Amino acid sequence: MNNIIVTSIDYILNWSRANSLWPLTFATSCCGIEMMQTVASDNDIARFGSEVFRGSPRQADLLICAGTITYKMAPVLVRLYEQMAEPKYVIAMGACTCGGGMFADTSYSVINGIDKIIPVDIYLPMCPPRPEALLDAIRKLQDKIKKESIIDRKKFLEKHKTKLFDTNSNKEVINEY
Ligand code: SF4
């Protein structure tokens, strides 16, 4: 009986979380334009409950990282992620965010994938991903949230801890900021 009650509460919580993801307003380069287009009436992200972009990380539970992240930017991204409300989710939008994109082999300053510094739930490569692709990523994240239990989430976050780089020495500093 207890199992039935816990499973039902989990289901209701996950269902409401999945359908009311509030994204943080965060974009660093060209992928951000596609993210803005996703909110416009043509694509209407409101159909999926994610139209409430917030200016403060404390009021957001979805980080759509749209654009290149440099080592200098890394502390800001990690701090914003840490300040977001739990449970929080991340979509890596664009080839640059997922793996460094065109800068992967040519730039000394770009991080080759934000999963090196924060946990990523959904990868959305392409350069740039179209608004339809971002909507598809949000649907996939919703499916993930609906199936995930609190224990699964805890295990995922234990496996993917936030990391930080010292911008002067470029050395990795884990959870020390
Ligand atoms: S993936 Fe392409 S569109 Fe997106 S930030 Fe990189 S270069 Fe710009």
Image (cartoon, helix red, strand yellow):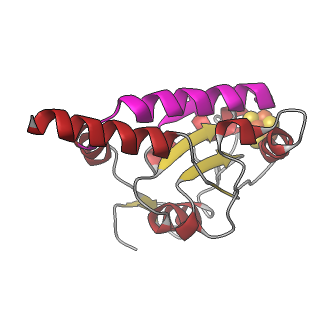
Q: Quadrant of the C terminus?
A: bottom left
Counting from the top left corner in percent of width and height, residue 105 is at: 65, 34
Counting from the top left corner in percent of width and height, residue 68 is at: 70, 47
| Highlighted range, magenta | 121-150
- Residue 116 seen from this side: yes
Q: Is residue 125 magenta?
A: yes
Compare residues 28 and 121 and report the one nearer the observer. 121
**Main secondary structure type of the part rendered in magenta:** helix
Who's the residue at 36% across and 28% down the image? 147
Tell me if residue 43 comes above or below residue 85 in the rendering. above
Counting from the top left corner in percent of width and height, residue 64 is at: 63, 46
Residue at the far left in the pictured view: 1
Who's the residue at 80% across and 39% down the image? 38
Counting from the top left corner in percent of width and height, residue 143 is at: 48, 27
Compare residues 82 and 40 and report the one nearer the observer. 40
Question: On the picture, is 132 further left or further right than 170?
Answer: right
Residue 130 found in image quarter = top right
- Residue 120 seen from this side: no
Who's the residue at 34% across and 45% down the image? 160
Question: On the picture, is 31 further left or further right than 4?
Answer: right
Q: Quadrant of the N terminus?
A: top left
Compare residues 163 and 24 and report the one nearer the observer. 24
Tell me if residue 153 comes above or below residue 55 in the rendering. above
Tell me if residue 110 comes above or below residue 176 in the rendering. above
Question: On the picture, is 142 further left or further right than 106?
Answer: left
